Image (cartoon, helix red, strand yellow):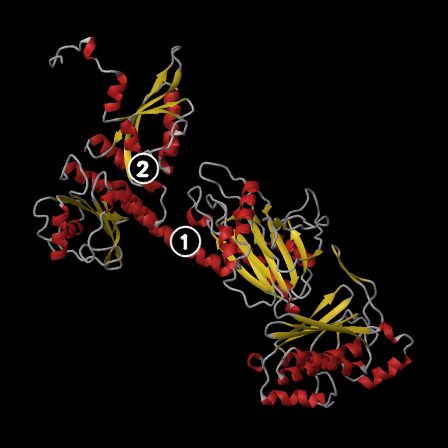
Amino acid sequence: MTRWGEPFRESDALATAEVVDQAQIAIVVIDRFSLLRYWNPYARELFGFVDGRDYVGMSLLDIGIHESDREHASQLARRVLRGEPWEGTFAVLKGDATWIHVRAQAVPMLDEAGEVDGIALIAREALRSGRVEEQYGLLERIGSRLAGSLELDSTVKGVAGILVPQFADHCFIDLYDHERLVRQVSVHAEGWEPPPRTWYEVGDEVRYPERHFVTQSLRRLETVVSSEHLYESSPNDRSDRVSRQVGVTSAIAAPLRARGEVLGVLTLALSGLSPRQKSSYGGFDRDLVGAIASRVALAIDNARLYEEERGTALAFQKSLLPSDFPTLDGLTLAHRYLPAGPINGRGLQAQVGGDFYDAIPLSAGRVGLVIGDVEGRGPHAAAVMGQLRAALRAFAQADREPADILRELDEWVRRLGIPDGNGGVWIPSVSCLYMVYDAWSRELSYANAGHAPPLLVTSDSVETLDLEVTDRMLGVRAKGGSGEDIVYHQADLRLPIGATLVMYTDGLVDRRPVGGEPDPEGALVRLKERVSEVADKDVEQIAEAAVYSVPGELEDDTALLVVRTHSEELALREGWFPSEASTVGAARHLAADTFKEWGVDRDQAELACLLVSEIVTNVVIHATPHPVHREFTGAGVLDSESPLSSNGGGADEFDEDWSDLLEAVAEEDESSEDPAEKEFLLRLRRGANAIWVEVFDHDLRLPRIRSAAADDEGGRGLYLVEQLASRWGSRPTPDGKAVWFEMPMHADGSEGTDGDTREEPERAAER
């Protein structure tokens, strides 16, 4: 062997491969496309390559580089491929799930023609050596990591993840909760955990002795280093024993201050948990940790403001959406709302959105189902959504037709415009799908203002529901149009037995994958696949699977409504009757027999039969002799005939006048040439705990309650219905109207059935 200082003889020269293999530094070679071509044994150890896995041809980004540093690594490659060397630090998640920070140098590799053909990367673990330039790099990394952090929990955990184990073996962050100091973070190297009831745990109130270095740091409001007499002021004997056992050698405490307020304290310590070249902190470390603490405090303060704003925004959003729905016969519902994440530095204001959903109980057990999305984000979009939902509920509960409701909402949206700053008015665009579902017939009537169709889930498949009509979004008119070109159409379809609908807004399928672009079509495929996997589960599991079926960032808020249909405990019976006095008893007879068969309580059945008599009597007295066809068009409601009036005038409301009693009606029926033209339909429905009665006739006039004088013989029928039924109402139909009321099947759920109230209907029944 050649003596030291003498040149190698040719026979003693080592092969280049042997030198690289024995080098205690990682060497990685990648090609022009950032694909791995070579690495030495130390690189395998440093990056934690999994044994047996072939990494050749894999991207540099796939060796464990943290997501937050991937763009950093991509810039490295682009710069070096231009022929410039590069040096820097980035975080790596090793194969054993431990974090390290890597200091790397990258130089271009040239081919025989002198062109850049690849990159040689030389790397080693950073920070443990104590080199000053690496510690400054740590400060830079912490600043960049905290700059994008807005949530308190992720902020404090992110700081600890950067500092341990490469700068400290232990990291504690204690924050004030009013006057109490509470531990928020307790992180240790090598996965070590202190024994229970020794060191303070996360969530514990922390009390330091008067002479403890942390107390001194908080009192002086400066960073304090403690190496000597470290154990003399331990909080208790158990804490002291654990500190000695783990070999704590040095510690730093730095107050966390922001906007003149002390938020808490950051404490770091060195011990024997991990090997490192230095065992105690010095003056430079104290200054460095002080600088780190100031950045951490600012990030914590921002995170707290963010959380406060988040709570306000979400409370505002939740107040505009239904928190729960009543029990609906024939339907089971689940709903979700996910706020968007902050974008472009706009914080929580960007999270507030205009997505909405609703399920509205209508007449005779029918249900209105709504899903919609207001354009844009922010408080104005949420305010528009809140007003639209209130208006839609009012229109729906008045039993307006779906197309008619969208026409009204379109005008409503235009009134909500705001100045655009250029002398014009900005009118939001709103997509809205409104459907009315009848669980007894499984018929679905709908109108659609530019919203995506829901998914139809059956026992065989998950497909997009085929909607025959789709019109423009609310608030949108053709260029130069006057508004007359906006016509909302209506269509009907029948759902299969046991079908489930998944109604959603576009935020669900427009998510942006990390480092990619939104792919709505691909996202819809993934949504269908995920829903099909849980199609036989309950609606809550379907909703949960749907909202998390598409990976990526939530750049838009998302509303979801899952509706499962079923027919358990539903029954229906109906019959047509001539509008004659003699049929009042027959109609009541049908109702009595049906209620008995359905198991309605006797008292409730008698009360319901009484109300059947009242509304059937109204029909017999006031029904128009000829059917009149009503058509709902874009220009309004068109009737084929004008409604009749008892006084020959132009009254368009049902005037409940009992002066013409049933006897007079009977005489009129006897003289009528074609009494069969006057007829009505009595329809009875049963749900789980309630019954509904509907009476359909060809009269276009809607009934109203009349205040009868003390000596009037009639005029109290609808008043009795108002007082004794749970709900009642009327709605126009294409060829007339329907009057309906609801009653509980059992007395425990009834209203207005005390003794005093029952006397009046009994007297009325004797008329």
Q: Hey, what amino acid is under mark 1?
A: Arg
Q: Which x, y percent locates residue 381? A: 53, 51
Q: Secondary structure at mark 1?
A: helix
- Which residue sits at x=53%, y=59%? 539
Q: Residues within 10 Å of mark 2 (few under 14, many from 20)?
A: many
Circle on res. 735: none
Rendered residue at 37%/18% (across/down): 83
Mark drawn on residue 94: 2
Question: In this picture, is 489 found above or below 761?
Answer: above
Report x, y in % for residue 313.
44, 55
Q: Is residue 324 left or right of residue 468?
A: left
| Quadrant hosting residue 649 | bottom right
* Residue 306: % across, % down: 37, 50
Residue 235 shows in this picture: no
In space, the residues marked 1 and 2 are separated at their CA atoms by: 34 Å
Tell me the quadrant of the picture where the C terminus can be found.
Answer: bottom right
Disc 2 residue type (three-letter): Lys
Quarter assignment of residue 654 = bottom right
Determine crowd level at label 1: few under 14, some 14-19, many 20+ residues with C-alpha closer than 10 A. many
Q: Is the residue 759 above or below the residue 125 in the image?
A: below
In this view, 552 is above or below 308: above
Q: Quadrant of the N terminus?
A: top left
Disc ID at residue 310 = 1
